[in-house]
Image (cartoon, rainbow, N blue to C red):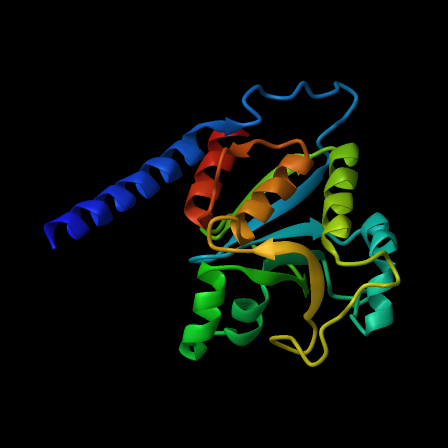
Amino acid sequence: MRTGIRWLLRIVFLLVFLATAGTFIPRPLIAPVKASSSAATHRILLLAGPIHTDIAIPLDEETRAAFSFLADTDFPLAHPNAEWLVVGWGGRAFYLETPTWAELKPLPVLRALTIDRSVLHVDLAGHITEPQPAVTAFNIGEDQLAQLRNFILDSFDGEAGEIAPIPNAGYGGIDRFFEAEGHFNALVGCNTWTAAALRSAGLRTGLWNPLPQSLRLSASVYN
């Protein structure tokens, strides 16, 4: 019994140590040199919940053009009141079957703790008030925004025009789910994808950010 408790404490200590190191060791280790001609004229948002993060990018003409294939899936990309395209990546079972905490089920949790197929959740947002606790904003240049768009595009399973929307999947009348590249588990999950998305835009994150809290802290410290 005591041996089991000792091993459990060691595992907990190891996870706490890794999470702390993952927060305070920057990735990349050396800050990238920014081109002087690349003015930070675009704003992107990190949207954080208790266990999940999303990326919001401005729904300008370039974004609408890059994601125009979404209109073929009845996604209302041209909605007149939309200001942001909001994208998140996650495990298929947990994402699709747990729209609220009240609908939490054992099987999606088990899949999330082991391994699961991944999906992208795509939504629109109107005006997002700043500042607020759940929103972290970053200013980036045109080239960095283009790189972020490409990162998101590459996360769809399939080429533009051949993506796979998931039928009858969504939390409301606007949002959609799509098959995504990669597999999900609790150690390499939604927040590590969001961190990689930020890094694609030339920002720095922690070495390993499995939780929204660690991602927000490291992104704020190193940018």
Question: Which residue occupies 74% across, 66% down?
Answer: 81
- The C terminus is located in which quarter? top right
Residue 63 x %, y %: 81, 51
Counting labels gives 0
Q: Is residue 204 left or right of residue 221?
A: right
In the picture, residue 107 is in which quadrant? Answer: bottom left
Residue 14 x %, y %: 31, 39
Residue 163 x %, y %: 81, 63
Question: Which residue occupies 61% across, 32% down?
Answer: 203
Q: Is residue 128 visible?
A: no
Question: Which residue occupies 72% across, 52% down?
Answer: 155
Q: Is residue 187 left or right of residue 80?
A: left
User: Which residue is most to the bottom?
Assistant: 168
- Foreground: 33 or 62? 33
Residue 51 x %, y %: 44, 57
- The N terminus is located in which quarter? bottom left
Question: Which residue occupies 41% across, 74% down?
Answer: 106
- Foreground: 190 or 34? 190
Relative height, residue 167 to residue 64 (above, below): below
In the picture, residue 11 is in which quadrant? Answer: top left
- Foreground: 14 or 139? 14
Q: Is residue 46 visible?
A: yes
User: Which residue is most to the left?
Assistant: 2
